Amino acid sequence: MLPTDILLIHASMIACTPRVTDSANIGTRLLIDARSGMLAVKELLGSKLKFGLIALAIGLVVSLTLLMAAMSEGLLTGMTGAKGSLAGDALVFQGDTYPILERSVLSAEDLQRIASAEGVANSYGIGHVIVSVNSTDEPFDARVFGLGDRFDQLPLVEGDLVSGPGQAVIDVTAKVTGVGIGDTLGLTPIDEELDVVGITEDRQYVMTPAVYVDLPTWERLYLVTALGRMQDAEGHGAPEPELLARQVSGSASIAAVELEEGFTLERLASELGSDFVVVTPEEAALAGNGMPEMVVAIGGIQVVSLAIGALIVGVFSYITTLHKTGQIAAIKALGASNGYVYRQLLVQITLLVPVASAFGLAMTLGASLSMPPTMGLEPQPERWAITLVLVYIMAYLGSLFSLRSILAIDPATALDRAEH
Amino acid sequence: MSLLEVRNVSKSYGSGHASVTALSDVSFVLDEGRLLAVLGPSGSGKTTLLSIIAGLLRPTSGQIIIDGKPIHLRSNREAAAFRRSRVGLVFQDHHLVHYLTAKENLLLVPHLSGRIQHQHRELASSLLGEFGLEARANHTPSMLSGGERQRVAIARALMNEPRIMLVDEPTSNLDTERGRQVVEMLSRHISGREMTCVMVTHDPRMAEAADEALHLIDGRVHSADAEGVLASAP
Ligand SMILES: Nc1ncnc2c1ncn2[C@@H]1O[C@H](COP(=O)(O)OP(=O)(O)OP(=O)(O)O)[C@@H](O)[C@H]1O
Ligand SMILES: [Mg+2]
C-alpha cells in the first residue's frame, strides 16, 4: 500500500466519522422527542376533561375570529359589493366629490374627455341614483346603477341581461322582499316602472340591493328624482325641466376605464388633472360610507380576539404548570432538563390546537346558520389555514408564560415537601 | 475504598441577619452494600444533607466525594446527568406521575435517559416482583395504597441501577408495621450489591433495619453508631 493510500484512507475516515455520528445523534434526538411526546399524550389522555375545557376555550376564540372574518366579508359585500366589483382598471370620479358616489357628476363633455384621454383603451359611464320600490309586499330602498357598457360583468343567477330601456337586473338580496323575474317594480315617488329580467349576486351598496339598468333608463330616473327633490326642497322654483334634461343628457355619475397595456393610474390621473379623481374599484370600495373605520374596527376585533386567545393559552398553561410544580420538581430531580419539561408542554399544545380549531369551526358553522344568508360562512380553506397558523403562533407565544415558571422550579423542593 | 465520602460539609441558607445554618462541619464515609439511617429532630438538617449529596444543593463549604470523584463542583446540568445515571431518589411525598401506571412510572427513568429498551422492561418487571407489586403493575398511583406507592417509588429509584440511593422519610405516611416492611425490603435489596443508601427518618424504629446510623442535631453530628461512621467533634 502506498503512503498516499494510507493518507487517503485517513482523510476519508476523518471526513466520514463526524458525519456518521452526527446523523446518529440527530436520529436519537428525534426518537427522544417522539418519546417525550408520548408522556405528554399520556397526560392529555389522563385529564381529558381539563384539556377538553382548554380546547373549548381556545375553540371559542377561533370561532370568534372566523365569525369576525365572515362578518367583515359580509359587511364589505353588503356595503360596497356593487362599487368594488365594477369592471375596469380604474374608476373616475368628479374632482372634490370623491369618495362620495352620490355627489359625483360627470357631464357628457367630461365623459368624452375621459374616453379620449391618452392611455384609455375603453371607457363607459356609470350612473347612480337612489330609488324606493313600493310595489312589493315589503317596500325597500334600492341603488340603481346605469351601465353605459359591459353588462357582461354581472354574474347571472337567473334570467337574462338588460337588453333595452325599462329592463332591470337586480341583486339576489331583493328576493327576500318577494321580487322575482317577470315582476314590475313600481318606484315612488317618481312614478316610474322597471321590468325585472335577471337576478345577479354579491351586488349591494350600503346594505341595499343594486338594480342595473341601461344608461338612458338611469338618465330618466335621475332626472325625475332630481326634479322631485328640488320641488320638495323649495316647494316651487324648480329649474325648467327642459333645461335640466339638456344638462343631464349624456352624463353619468362616474366613469369606468380600461387602460392600455402598461399605462398606470397615476399617468391617467395627471393626464386628466384635478377636475377628476382616479382610483381602482377596490380603493373606491374601501373609501367613504365609514368603510375605513369599519375595516379598522373589524381588524382590531380580530387582532384582539387572537391576543385574548394567546392570553387564554398562556394563563391555562401557566396555571397547569403551577398546579404540577411538585411533579415537575420531582421529574427535574430525577434528572429531566427544563427543555424536556417545556417540550412536553409544546407537544400538548401542538395536539390541542387542531382539536380546538375543529371545535371552533363547528361552533362557527353552527352560529352562521342563524345569520342572514348574506353573512353566511362560505367554505374558505385558505382563511381557515391562516387562522390555524395564527392560533398555533398565539398558542406557542402563550406557552412562553409557563417557560418562565418551569425554569423557576427548583428540583431541590421535591425532597421533603409533602404537598397535601 | 468507600463509595460515599462527606467531608466537613457546612450549609447556610440566606445571608446576613436572615442567615440560617442548616449543616455545620458534617463528615462521614459509607461503604458499598450499607444502609445509613440519618436521624434527627425536625429542622436538624437531614433533608439539606440529602439534597447536597444528590447535587440538588451546593454546600457552603466542604466536599462530597462519590467513587473518588467530587460531585459538589458540578454544574446543574452535570448534576442532573449524574442523578439520571448514578443516583436513585425517593421522596417523602412519593411524587409518582399520577397519569402513569406503576410500571410506566418505573420506565420513566430510562425514558429520561433517552431510550426504553427490552432490558428496562425486564428490570421493571423484576423490581415490581421483588417489592411485591406484580399484580399492581398496571395500576395508577391513585389505585394504590400508601405503602404500595412508596414501594413503587423505591423500585423506580432502582431503575437506573444507581450507585447511591437517597431516601427521604419513606415511611412518614405509613404506619409502623408497613414502614418497617418497606425499610426491610430496601435493606435487603442493598446488602451485597455495589451500591449504598442514605435514608432520612425521624423515627428511630425505622433505623433498626439500617446498618449504620447518624444523629443530627442543629446541623451537627451528635452521634454515630457502627464503625465506618466518623463523628465530627462535638
Ligand atoms: N430553602 C431554605 N431557605 C432557608 N432556610 C431553609 C431552607 N431549607 C431549609 N431551611 C432551614 O434549614 C434548617 C434545616 O432544614 P431541613 O429541611 O434540612 O431539616 P430537616 O431535618 O429535613 O427537617 P424535617 O424533619 O422537618 O424535614 C431548618 O432550620 C430550615 O428552616
Ligand atoms: Mg426533611
Image: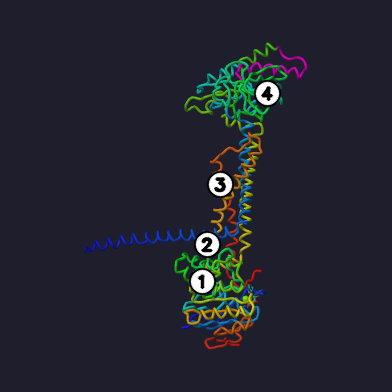
The image shows residue A363 at horizontal and vertical percentages of: 63, 45
| Residue at the spot 55% in from the left edge and 88% down from the top edge | B226
Q: Quadrant of residue A238?
A: top right
Residue B229, horizontal then vertical, whole percent:
54, 86
Discs 3, 1: same chain: no
Judge if badges 4 and 1 mark residues of a common chain.
Answer: no
Q: Residue furthest right?
A: A235
> Is the residue A75 above or below the residue B133 in the image?
above
Q: Depth check: give the residue in front, B121 or A419.
A: B121
Pick the quarter of the image with the N terminus of chain A: bottom left
Residue B83 is tagged as: 1
Give the percent coordinates (x, y) of residue B108: 52, 66
Judge the density around disc 2: few (<14), some (14-19), many (≥20) Cα neighbours within 10 Å.
some
Tell me, yes or no, if residue A173 can be seen here.
Answer: yes
User: Real-space Cα distance between discs 3 and 1?
Assistant: 41 Å
Image quarter of residue A14: bottom left
Q: Label for residue A388? A: 3
Label located before the other in sequence (3 or 2): 2
- For ligand 1, the image quadrant comes to bottom right
- Highlighted magenta segment, given as a residue range: A213-240
Q: How is the image coloured?
A: rainbow
From the Cβ of disc 3, is ligand 1 less than 8 Å away? no
Instruction: Pinpoint the chain carrying mark 2.
Output: A
* Callout 3: SS: helix
Q: Which one is in front, B102 or A50?
A: B102
The residue wearing badge 4 is A130
